[in-house]
Amino acid sequence: MSLNNNMNSNFPKSYNIEYKKSTTHKIGQDMRGVVNYNFNHQGFRSNIDYQENEKNAIAFFGNLYTSAVGIEWNDGFPQKICDGLNMQCYNFSQGCAGVDNNEIVRTVRHVVQMESFNPSFYVVQLCELERRFSQKSLGLRLETNKEKNIENFLEVFAELETLMKEKQWMFFVMDHTLKHNVPSHIINHERCLCWNPYIIDKILQGIPGEKWHEMMGYSIARKIKKNAK
């Protein structure tokens, strides 16, 4: 199942498409059965179905962090931001698939190339540089060669910059595992909200909880308001 197709009138496909238009209580790393995971018609975790002509929207990209795995969706930073700014939350993160940065940016590319959908702002969460995701098998492997990881990341980030050239956007990176020595011009990039934000409340084997999402929501909303002036 590929996210890249030639039908620009369609939103990206979700790797959780089997849950579309439904609610589940156990998914990915969360087998507790205490959280409502609601999925929209497009198969993404969301309170709303997406409309291609929506302009008053923020588009979010990433993996489990942006999908708010482990907590209720309304407590996750994407929905909290949009509630506070009175905007629609369009979540394209692949929370329960082992996606990598290549896949995240492929999803960004798909949305950018859509002719009728023009969100007001893009928030891109990038993940651990060592992750390598297979679209074919939906499997994940880890690359331990840090030089290869940085080389791959630089290529992916260069594409992201090109895609976002005419957009309002920001990014942050969760690279806690191997902590790569990434060039300072990326870490200090004007669009970088933060690099490896500290997880202040860990649940589910290190997944951040509500306090972390509150912190990230406040920081991102403040940045969006500043850029809107």
Image (cartoon, helix red, strand yellow):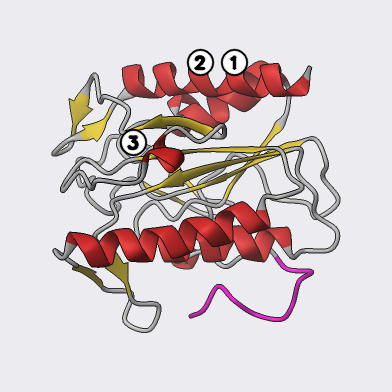
| Circle nearer the viewer, 1 or 3 | 1
Circle 2 crowding by C-alpha within 10 Å: few under 14, some 14–19, many from 20: some
Residue 218: give its label.
Answer: 2
Q: Please indicate whether residue 180 sits to the left or right of residue 153 in the image.
A: left
Q: Earlier in the sequence, mark 3 or mark 2?
A: 3
| Circle nearer the viewer, 3 or 2 | 2
Circle 1 crowding by C-alpha within 10 Å: few under 14, some 14–19, many from 20: some
SS at circle 1: helix
> Identity of the amino acid at label 3?
Val
Residue at label 3?
A: 35
Residue 185 in the image: x percent, y percent? 45, 40
Q: Which residues are magenta?
A: 1-10
Q: Main secondary structure of the magenta part?
A: loop
1 in relation to 226, above or below: below
Q: Earlier in the sequence, mark 1 or mark 3?
A: 3
90 in relation to 9, above or below: above
122 or 92: nearer the viewer: 122
> Identity of the amino acid at label 2?
Tyr
Residue at label 1?
A: 222
Q: Please indicate whether residue 177 sits to the left or right of residue 61 in the image.
A: left
Contact between labelled residues 2 and 1, with CB atoms less than 8 Å apart? yes
SS at circle 3: loop
Residue 4: give its label.
Answer: none
Q: Please indicate whether residue 202 sits to the left or right of residue 41 in the image.
A: left
